[in-house]
Image: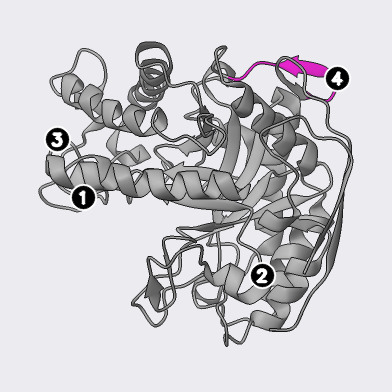
Amino acid sequence: MEKYIKIVIISSLLLPVNCCFSQQLVKLTDAKATRETKALCYNLHQLSRQHILFGHQHAMEYGHGWSGEKDKSDVKSVTGSHPAVIGVDFSGLSGKTDEEIQDTKEHLKKYIEATYNNGGVITASWHFNNPVSATDFYWKDSGVIPAVKYIIPGASQHEKYKSILRNIAAVAKSVKGKDGKLVPVIFRPFHEFDGDWFWWGRGHCTVQEFTTLWKFTVSYLRDSLGVHNFIYAFSPDNKFTTIEKYLERYPGNEWVDLVGIDNYGDWGRDGKYDTAAGIKKLKIVSDYAIKANKLAAFTETGLESTPNTSWWTAILLNALKSSKVQLAYVLVWRNDATSATHYYAPFPGHSSVPDFLNFYKDPYTLFENDLPNMYKINKKKTNSKQ
């Protein structure tokens, strides 16, 4: 592989008691958040002023044509560096046998700890199997129960929901780096709730039911189960065009640390592009984060199979830089191990590799090898990568 050198200048970072934004000190939703979690929050925000971290879902677990190889990712095979942000999923922590759930816990622990030890950032989505109808996470016309109203406090399946959250807490409290510290995780529950394709979507529960579920989830993990290494991320899909619509199911600033958006539709899905609309939505999220002193992120996007070989720079990078948004990271979806077409990041030999290398080399984008220590106080740093 050819050698590529990337110089990244990271500005001076000073860590206050809480996560600092602009001239204000802002507390995370968790007053007892670990020092490493506070540091991650602060560093993500500081870096977002001049950079964006690149992320890929399930990047180290599997990729195009492979699975379970040590310290491998398709992105690393192309660039020499893992993504800066790596996504995992809590989907296997319910609706399975006890043995399967235990296997999932060990699997998550392995990859969360590996990412932390490598210096990367972890985000966890939750494709949550329906706990009431015992179906999967998708909404289907028959046999699915609108579960939200049954799992909130006082409802018939609430105790079952608490037991599921205990599995999530067990993972959160077990993941430790080589330094002995709990690993911070950006937890992103109930994503894309403004669509109807998941059982927690807007057509299957009221605003009150959804916000009640959100608040209970945060408070139970934080206050009852003692999870203090989560950053809580709120991420609808792209069904909004105004800040009022974006905040329709927002539980309140005291319950959210990061505001995001999942958006495939405006960025080339099915051959349709509306980057102006996509940029407008990113600006709504970024502007609100600045106003409310929150982190912001492009929590999911991508172009399946990347048939547009200049998508990385001409579409994504150009839009992010020209819109002057302040986003902590952008994450593209997974590369399936067996599918010939279901992938969102390039792999060796893919036609978009040359453009992706230009995306990688741009000083605006940060990959794992570019990062300062995200979990401690950072001073000015020059990082070169080959």
Kind of residue sitting beneath label 2 = Gly
Which is nearer the eye, 379 or 287? 379
Kind of residue sitting beneath label 4 = Gln
Residue range corresponding to the magenta coloring: 21-28
Name the image quarter holding the C terminus. bottom right
Q: Which residue is mark 4?
A: 23
Contact (CB < 8 A) between labels 3 and 4? no
For mark 1, give the secondary structure.
loop
In the image, residue 256 lies at what x, y percent? Answer: 55, 25
Which is nearer the eye, 309 or 90? 90
First in residue order: circle 4 vs circle 1: 4
Q: Which numbered disc covers residue 136?
A: 1
For mark 4, give the secondary structure.
loop
For mark 3, give the secondary structure.
loop
Any part of residue 342 in sight: yes
Kind of residue sitting beneath label 3 = Val
In the image, residue 89 lies at what x, y percent? Answer: 38, 48
Q: Residue at x 50, y 78 (%)?
A: 305
Contact (CB < 8 A) between labels 2 and 3? no
